[in-house]
Image (tube, rainbow, N blue to C red):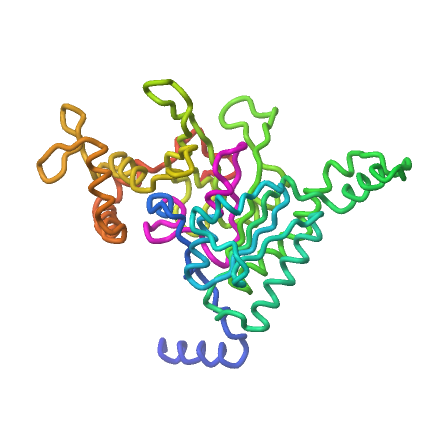
Amino acid sequence: MAKDTKAAMRNFFKKNVKKNAEHQHVSIWLDTGMPHFNKAISGKYTGGFPCGRITEIFGWESSGKTYVATQAMIACQKMGGIAIFMDHEKSFDSLLAAKCGLNVGDDGNWIYQHPKTFEESIIYAGNIIKQIRDEKIIEPEIPITLVFDSLASMIPKQLYEKMMNKADGKKSKKDDVNMNDNTALARCTSTYFPTLSSWASDFNVCMLFLNQCRQDIGVVFGDNTKAAGGKSPAYYASLRIQLSKAQIKDKGTNERVGDVVTAKAIKNKVAPPFKTASWNFYYDTDIGIDSTESLVDHMLAIGYLKKDSAGKILLNEKSYSRKNIIDNFKLIEKHRIVELLEKWHTENAEKADAAMDMDKEDIPEDESED
């Protein structure tokens, strides 16, 4: 009887059901440049940002949103893909990006635009990614990275036209800003994000929306930060990353020389949610982010590396300073370190995962599992 039932099921699907969609899970990831950040957002040290999905990265000013997005574009180009950057803030520095490793030349794998409105940006980007796939400029499995910087700076067309009329001296009563304009961005995202989600999947795009933080004055306890653009970005994003920062000061001069940036995966539909990763970001552009230093700190946090009673790091039964460990690890190929770390993390998952968990009070109520 069971055998006949299975045969009937196969026959039914063959005759009546469309072929199953091919994209049922994420198969392509873009390296963030920091293995422990990859682990926090994708569940593996060799992962990173998911292709075929929307990711929202939000935080306060100068928290490293553009830097993180630049790493995704670099990874995309290394795979033979195309990086597209829609600069609404007009603050992107191509020289700094090139210093990080991004190809910002005219080789065809870098597209940079200054759209005037939300609608212009979305339509232009959609047209470009569709043409790339229709004309088979790159193979279907090669990703496209599309960055919008930032969602909060994407001006709805209706508001832009009002401001232009005022600037041209053509202001009339209908050009006065009202409550309808205040909610225009949220209505734009509600209209366009369902299509954007489909485009990300259909055209194999790693779609990154950078966004700014806002204070929610209605929240008394817990995290009172929220992102601009209404509820749609949070709903359609498979991954939401909140960035925060704390100062790094020189021990001798007490001068601020950088920030400790912490990333929290407050929503994750591609890996276990509510994980964190931190790294040191230095203002000295010759240093920027030292991924090896941050990886060593991560290894200490999860227990892969341990300290002796004097505060030095133990390795092969010998004690080393933190600087010695970092310098020695820089001599080892990173993929080798990552292989060993992945194996150890798998064998010690309960303890290691717990060390990467967000504090319970920081988990948004609408994202919690309760």
Question: Picture quarter containing residue 228?
Answer: top right
Q: Is residue 204 left or right of residue 314?
A: right
Residue 336 % position (x, y)? 23, 53
Magenta-colored span:
40-69
Q: On the rendered image, what quadrant is the C terminus found in? A: top left
Question: Picture quarter containing residue 254?
Answer: top left
Residue 263 % position (x, y)? 43, 38
Question: Residue sitting at 90 percent across and 39 percent down?
Answer: 170
Question: Picture quarter containing residue 30?
Answer: bottom left
Residue 335 % position (x, y)? 27, 53
Say if residue 310 shows up in the picture: yes
Q: Is residue 138 magenta?
A: no
Question: Residue sitting at 27 percent across and 50 percent down?
Answer: 334
- Front residue (pair 66, 220): 66
Q: Is residue 45 magenta?
A: yes
Q: On the rendered image, what quadrant is the N terminus found in? A: bottom left
Q: Is residue 153 left or right of residue 52?
A: right
Q: Is residue 28 left or right of residue 56?
A: left
* Residue furthest left as drawn: 317
Question: Residue sitting at 42 percent across and 30 percent down?
Answer: 259
Say if residue 276 shows up in the picture: no
- Front residue (pair 328, 161): 328
Question: Residue sitting at 46 percent across and 52 percent down?
Answer: 102
- Front residue (pair 305, 67): 67
Q: Is residue 93 above or below residue 121?
A: above
Residue 273 % position (x, y)? 41, 43
